Amino acid sequence: MLNWLQPRLRAFREAFPEVGVTVRATIWITPRHANQPLVGRSLREEDLVMVCPRSFRHGPTPSGRPADPVRWPLIHVPGRQEHREAFAQYHGLTDLPLARGLTTDRSNVALEMAIAGLGFAITLASRAKVHLQRGHLVEPFPDRVASGWDCDLHPGE
């Protein structure tokens, strides 16, 4: 979520330069599935994006269709398999490469793996946004998919 915070913090500092700010590492912004109770305030509903390194869009067999990840490794995040399933269902894919590729327990690590050219990653759009803006990753397909997840801001203990 630090990638989400930085541009907002910059805007706040520009609007209120006299206000001191301390950023603590404890994160009170959490993802919440739509079927879970809201705790705090919902910031937004999330969309899913599939991202890949820019290099996957060039070369002799460039990626540009939703079926293309069948040719390339898919980076898996256990506990987020519904992201793959939602993407596959939306695009009518039955043969996403679920048995091969890399696995990590963090979406941010999956994004770093994708930047390194190790495969496609499917994640929440807010997590990929900074990498897309910096040009490290691209969205090979124009459609975003509803995720069933929200990001919530909640009070700490």
Image (cartoon, rainbow, N blue to C red):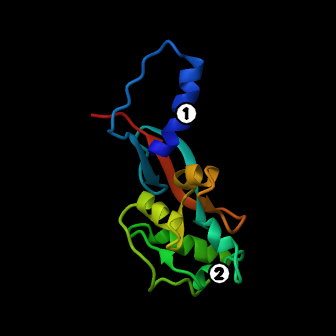
Q: Is residue 15 left or right of residue 41?
A: right
Q: Residues within 10 Å of mark 2 (few under 14, many from 20)?
A: some
Q: Label 1, on which residue?
A: 8
Q: Nearer the viewer, residue 55 or 40?
A: 55
What residue do we see at 55% from left, 29% from top? 10
Mark 2: which secondary structure? helix
Mark 1: which secondary structure? helix
Q: Quadrant of residue 50?
A: bottom right
Q: Quadrant of residue 106?
A: bottom left
The answer, for residue 104, to whether it is visible in the render is yes
Q: What's the residue type where badge 2 is placed?
A: Asp
What residue do we see at 60% from left, 61% from top? 137
Q: Nearer the viewer, residue 112 or 42?
A: 112
The answer, for residue 46, to whether it is visible in the render is no
Q: Is residue 147 above or below residue 133?
A: below
Q: Is residue 55 left or right of residue 31?
A: right
The x, y position of residue 153, in whole percent, is: 44, 38
Question: Which disc is residue 82 wearing?
Answer: none
Looking at the figure, which quarter contains the C terminus? top left
Q: Label 2, on which residue?
A: 68
Q: Quadrant of residue 135?
A: bottom right
What residue do we see at 59% from left, 77% from top? 88
Q: What's the residue type where badge 1 is placed?
A: Arg
The x, y position of residue 16, in whole percent, is: 55, 16
The x, y position of residue 100, in whole percent, is: 45, 84
What residue do we see at 45% from left, 43% from top? 2
The x, y position of residue 3, in whole percent, is: 49, 45
Q: Nearer the viewer, residue 77 or 136?
A: 136
Q: Nearer the viewer, residue 132 or 148?
A: 132
CA gap between label 1 and label 2 equals: 35 Å
